[in-house]
Image (tube, rainbow, N blue to C red):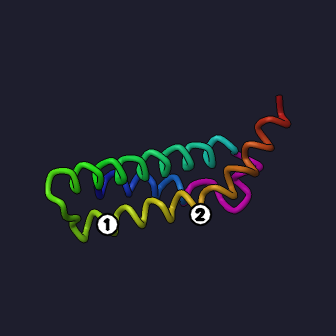
Amino acid sequence: MLVTYGVTAALAAAGGRDRAEEMPALALALAAKTGRDSYNCLKLGQEEWAENRAFCTYCQVATLASLASLALALPEVVRAARVATARR
């Protein structure tokens, strides 16, 4: 998990303030990565509940962090998508 969140952090830090307009692929990559992280966490939580009828604290913190990261990435993704479609 440290490696996957390290990659997410690197994507979030890359590109600077106007990356949605200057490098929309970075913003779109961050959205894809945070979306995949969120899906993985939710899926693991589902499996954990089915097998144990309990959740581990670490997993729930990771799920909340992933969902928050996705929510924070979405406004930038909307701007990047507009730029990407305008360039076509």
* Label ID, residue 72: 2
Left or right, 59 with respect to 52, comes to right
Asked which quadrant contains residue 71, the reply is bottom right
Left or right, 52 with respect to 14, comes to left
Give neighbour class at mark 2: few <14, some 14-19, many 20+ (Cα, 10 Å): few
Left or right, 10 with respect to 22, comes to left
Task: Work out which quarter of the rendered image holds the N terminus and state it.
Answer: bottom left
* Label ID, residue 43: none
Is 10 contained in the magenta span?
no
Residue 73 locus on image (x, y percent): 60, 57
Image point (83%, 34%), residue name: 87
Question: Mark 1 is on which residue type?
Answer: Gln
How far apart marks 2 and 1 lie (CA) works out to 18 Å
Image point (56%, 48%), residue name: 31
Viewer-proximal residue, 22 or 49? 49
Residue 12 locus on image (x, y percent): 54, 58
Relative to 29, residue 54 above or below: below
Q: Secondary structure at mark 1?
A: helix
Question: Mark 2 is on which residue type?
Answer: Leu
Image point (62%, 44%), residue name: 28
Q: Which residue is mark 1?
A: 60
The nearer-to-camera label among 2 and 1 is 1
Q: Please provide the residue range marked out in magenta.
A: 13-23
